[in-house]
Image (cartoon, rainbow, N blue to C red):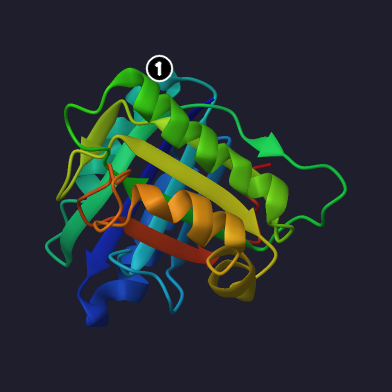
Amino acid sequence: MYSVTRLLDVVEADRVRIRQELQQVARQCDAVRQLVAPTLTGSRNGGDLLVHLRFDSAEAWSAAADRFDAALRDPAITRVNGADYPGSPQIIGGRSPGRVYRTLLLRVAPGTDGPTADRFEADLRLLPGYVDTISAWQLSRAERTVGDTQWTHVFEQEFTDADGIMGAYLMHPIHWAVVDQWFDPECPKVIVRERVCHSFCSDEARVLR
């Protein structure tokens, strides 16, 4: 599978129009899964609209990319952050399907050695096993990026609800005692030094399924 995520800052008066136009373009892109939705309160550097498209292959995205990128050049869209990346979602059995999609765009510091990056990714993969509000997830390395930062990773989850992110996830000991060390500038293990994009929205389509 091949995914495309875009976080859009949009002039407030034009958000409904932009959302409707992008939903139409998304339907024309032959994506296996598609989501265009307003971000929810609590997103940080996450834009006003979250767009996620999932394709069978990178070639399928390439066939639709020009049409989609043209739509993002609307002057009402003032900033775009995003990434294109391969990967397949991991579904956690026995948990109720979520209704909130969350994505995290981050950049591992240049010069980080391979074994350290591998340990960082391994710690991120621990999270879904401990946080029972997560029902599906995917960790990917970005192939192409857009926006303020050359993102290296995209970490996505499907949550039961917004409280499952802001409470059970961000406040879980596995998060603040293990994972946060990679992001904390006061910790010797820190390798994510630039601002991240933490964005989430309602997802009745369940795009990680």
Image-based side of 188 in relation to 11, left or right: right
Q: Is residue 58 above or below residue 36?
A: above
Q: Is residue 10 visible?
A: yes
- Residue 143 at what x, y percent from top left? 31, 25
Q: Nearer the viewer, residue 113 or 99?
A: 113
* Residue sitting at x 59%, y 55%: 174
- Residue 39 at what x, y percent from top left? 42, 70
Among all residues in the image, which is located at the extreme right? 94
Q: Nearer the viewer, residue 164 or 115?
A: 115
Crowding near pointer 1: few (<14 within 10 Å), some, many (20+)?
Answer: few
Image-based side of 198 in relation to 203, left or right: left
Q: Is residue 144 above or below residue 126?
A: above
Marks counted in the figure total 1
Image-based side of 148 in relation to 151, left or right: left
Residue, disc 1: 59
* Residue sitting at x 70%, y 52%: 130
Among all residues in the image, which is located at the extreme front? 188
Image-based side of 128 in relation to 116, left or right: right
Figure quadrant of residue 144: top left
* Residue sitting at x 43%, y 76%: 42
> Which quadrant of the figure contains the C terminus?
top right
> Which quadrant of the figure contains the N terminus?
top right
Amino acid type of the residue tagged 1 in the rendering:
Glu
